Structure formats: structure tokens, C-alpha cells
Amino acid sequence: MQWRSIVVGLVVLRLSFSCVIWLAFGLGPNVSWGFNFPLSFSLHKLDLLFGDEKGTDPRRNSWSQRVHVHRHEEVATTCAKVGEGSPERSYLSFFDSNRDEYSRRYSSFPDTLKAKMKDMAKEMFYFGYDNYMKYAFPEDELNPIDCEGRGPDVLNPSNININDVLGNYSLTLIDTLDTLLVLGNVTEFQKAVKLVIDTVSFDKDSTVQVFEANIRILGSLISSHILLTDPKHPFGKVDYEGYDNELLHLAHDLAVRLLPAFENTLTGIPYPRVNLKTGVPPDSINETCTAGAGSLLVEFGILSRLIGDSTFEWVARRAVRALWSLRSNETGLLGNVVNIQTGQWVGKQSGLGAGMDSFYEYLLKSYILFGEKEDHRMFQDSYESIQNHMRRGRESCNEGEGDPPLYVNVNMFSGEIMNTWIDSLQAFFPGLQVLNGDVDNAICLHAFYYAIWKRFGALPERYNWQLQAPDVLFYPLRPELVESTYLLYQATKNPFYLHVGMDILQSLEKNAKVKCGYATLHHVVDKSKEDRMESFFLSETCKYLYLLFDEDNPLHKSDNKYIFTTEGHIVPIDMRFREKQWDDEFPCEEAVLAEQKPNNRKPPPSNNSNCNRIPEERRYTLPLKSVYMRQIDHMVGLF
């Protein structure tokens, strides 16, 4: 009978231990019966997250609250009181130990290590680029495992995962042009430009996605043309004798081939795909995503202002206005999929990731480039709606109680949470917040994505914050987290972000490097791979990693200011893009203006820097207090 006494004793000990934690940290019934505490993401919280509670604040401190409020009404937040007369203690106190661990790791970054990481990023780029040129050019992409080229899937036209992007036009070479200049390789840049001029044609029987062709091909051609011809650009003498605006002509030719997408649509919102020879396919669907239709204005607008033809900016701006007019009257939010003929929302999810991301990005960047107040109004109203309805967690990133800020997917009409996952594309948003001057919020959201990276050595395509596990397991070498890391470092100069970049760089070397390049991770847990290296790996991921560690890059030393397109292409903030060579043929439609909320908001100077928002005394301390970093690490399952 001795074994029964032992079992009873263990059960009593376990129950006693749980009660002690229950009292000490104010966790209430949230504590599990095991020792793995505290379980702040349990499945039983879903009722609260999805419930229609009257009078609740959508920005409440805790997005990991318990659910059965009707049973446990006294447990209002994760910062519950122990008793009426006792001092408040939250579970944050659990993370208050070992607070110097993060400071020791992240508070400095030697120049010698920075130089080493810069060289490592450079070698990473050239390992991918050289092998593309050796084994894949003139095809669109490199298969880095088999060392072969990849083009459109002509045998399976419905394979849009491939055919939306690959148009049989040497995609990787074109997408990579300005990265060569960032790395200081003028000779290879000029050679690559001549190859593009001599070998690329868009007169192809290829059906491609308008959005992908715009950001990857059109944007790169325009950027490279500007860098070739602009005497103020920072990379020295990069033009060559005999260049006669061929890249601009190619960009114009491609844009003309994309224009049929805007025809025969009752709303002005474009079809998602066109055939470069024949126009919109007869079997084309009438549904498109908000980002795909609303993220054309930067490239189309620059092209219009370079060639003096308003057509391209007009159709892109009309699409943005059409989408804007369809936003919810209750929340100010847009959905993620819309019918281009009826204007009805097919997808009612509103978030910051796939299907939505670059729509917001291009509202702000269009304003920065073109100075149109309409773009600024739309962005600021969008940002206010995002903060009001998508943001959960404590009010301040670096102060107070509650969960860290997180932006969740909500119903565009009600603002209620629709699911409990976020996707890797959302990692761009901290960078956009930096451009908007909201550096504190950027710091917190970036820290959450970095914690996920630390756990898996990559970003899963979707991560379920409720289950602390990936929902979609692949990672195609996306750049969004690197981009935000780079922009946060430029804004704060905090060495923490150099450590983040080093972690990302080393993870890619360890987990993605294969025989002839870097391969998509099929599974972020077991690190199995797919034989594909998307063009944005060289165009963006490697570019931002290199710039992060290259303090003396001409781009950082130039007197002129630049922004990056959503594909990472460099465009100058130039007064010539504020000037139109045509009368304003597309004034703001009355419907758009009538629906604008009256406000006294004064647009800021659209080329002003917000980098000084972080006080000097904070630049060499942790951007986020150790207790909050530890809290975030715990919330993604790091300990």
C-alpha cells in the first residue's frame, strides 16, 4: 500500500503548489493542474475573444483573457487583484527575474562583428545570385537544390502559386538590379542592365498577376532607370555610354500590357490577372484582394510622372478610391477580398497580413512621394481604425500591465476577432509604423515576431497565438521581419536590432542554404525544404540584411532621401514627383470626400524624419524592458 500513499502525497503536493501560484500571481483558475504555468493562451478563452460583449473596450489590456466571464466575472484581466485590500500583483512579476539576461546579450555590438555580418550578408547574396546566373538565367527563378532554372508551369495553367509570379521574363535578374548597386557592384549592375535590355521581352503568352508584375518587374525597371539617370543618386557614376532610357521603355511597355485589367470592371477595381499578349483571360474571376488591387499607385504614379502620361496614375488611384469607398461605416475597416463588378465584400476579414498589407503601406508611401493630401487622410484614418479595432493588449508598449500589443484579424463590420492566427507578412507593419513616427508600437510588435523567429529559426507563414504553434508551416525566405528590423535600427540605432539581424542571418545560413542557393523551408520545425528560391530573397531579404550592417552605405550618407517600394526597390523622394505634367484629371470624387471624417489634422511635412522620436538616453538601452521581452518570449513558448 506504500505506493498508494506516494501517489496521494504527490497529488496533494501538486494541488498545493497550484494553489500557491494561484494566490501569488493572481492567475486565478487560469493555472493548469500541471507545472507548466501560466497558460495564458488556453483554448477555453475563445468565448471571450469571439463573444459580443457590450461595453467592452476592444483595446483592453489582455488579448489572452479567460473566457467564461459569466462564471468568473471577477477575473477581468491577466492583472487580477489578489484581494480588495492587497496590493496588485500581475503575472508580469513572474517575468521580472533574470532581468539582466537580455541587457547582457543585446546591449552592445562590436564593430568587428558588424563588419563580419556585413560580409556574411554580401556572400549570401552572391551565392544565390551567381548560381542563378550560372544555372537558371534566362529563366525566372533558380531551383537551388537541383541547380536548375524554373519558369511558368505551362502544363498546368491553374498553378497560380507559380504562374502568378513567373512570366518567362528573367524575373530574378530584373528584381535584383538595384541590390547590385546597394552592394557597390557598378560593373555587374551595368552588365545586368544590358542583359535585360538585350534579352527581355514582355510580348509573351504568359498570364501573370498584375500585383506581382507591378511590384517585382515594373518597380525594379523604374528604380534602376532612375538610378542610371539621376545625377543626385548616391552610388556614384553608374550610367554608361549609349543608355537611351531602354529600361523606362520596357517599364512603359509592361504597364500598357497590364492596363486591360482595369477595363470592363464596373467598380474601377482591376482584374487580378492579365495575359501579356491577349489581355484579361476569358475565364478570369471577378474577385481580387485589397492589397493586389490597391498597391499599384507608387509604381504607376512614378511612371506617369516620368513619361508625362496620366493614364497609369489615374487607373491606380481610381482603384484605391473605389476600395476606400467600400469601407465599413461602423469601423472604417476594409475587407480582404472584393468582387470587382458588384463591389460586395467576399472576404470580410480585416487584418494587416496577406491580402491587406501593402494597401496601407502604399497610402503612406504615395503621400511621401507625391504629396497628395488625400493619400495622407486615407492613411491616417486607416491607422486610427486599425488602432481602434485590431490592436489588443496594454495601452503602452513599454509601460503598464497586461499583454503586449498585438494586431489581430477582425470582422470588418463588427471589429470582432475572426481567428487566432497572424501571418508572416504582417511583420512588415513595424517598419510602416516607423515611417509614421509610431516607433514605440513598432518596437513591441517587432519583438513579438522576433520571438517567434527565435523559437523556430524562421517565421511560419501563419502562427496561432492562441495555440502557440504554427498553423501554416512553410517559410519562403520572406523579407518582412528583416525590413522592419532595418528600419527600426535606422530609427533608434539600438544594437538590439543588429543582434536580431545576426540571428536571422545565421538562421538562414544554417537552415536554408543548399547546394546552389537558399531554399524555401517547407516545415519550420523539422526544417525540410522545397526546391525554390523566390526572387524577393535577393531583391529584399539580402538587401535589408546588408544595409542593416553597412553603416557607411552611400544610401545612408546621401543628402537625398529615399524610400523602398513594397518589393524593396529604391526610389528617391524627389520634387519632380510632386509635379504633374497634366491638368488634374482625377480630382477627389465627391463620394470620397463626403465620407471623410472632419478633422483638424495637419499633414506633416511628407519628407520629414521621425527618427528623433526615441530619446537619446534610450538608444543604447534595450528598446523594450527586459520584463516585457521575457513576457513575449514566454507567450510564444520559448520557455
Image (cartoon, helix red, strand yellow):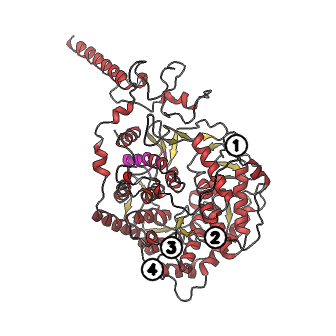
Residue 328: image tag? 1
**Spatial separation of the CA atoms under disc 4 and disc 1:** 49 Å
The one nearer the camera, 45 or 297, is 297
Residue bearing mark 2: 577
Q: Residues within 10 Å of mark 3 (few under 14, many from 20)?
A: many
Give the residue type that dot 3 points to.
Leu
Q: Judging from the image, what secondary structure is the residue with disc 4 in?
A: helix
| Nearer-N-terminus badge (2/1) | 1
Give the residue pinned by disc 4.
186
Q: Amino acid at mark 4?
A: Val
The amino acid pointed to by label 2 is Phe
- Disc 3 is placed on an element classified as helix
Q: Position of residue 310 (x, y in %)?
A: 73, 70
Magenta stretch, residue numbers: 445-462
- The quadrant in which the C terminus is found is top left
* Residue identified by numbered label 3: 177
Residue at x-position 31% and y-position 52% = 107
Q: Is residue 397 above or below residue 146?
A: above
Residue type beneath disc 1: Ser
Q: Are marks 2 and 4 in contact (CB under 8 Å)?
A: no
Q: Secondary structure at mark 2?
A: helix
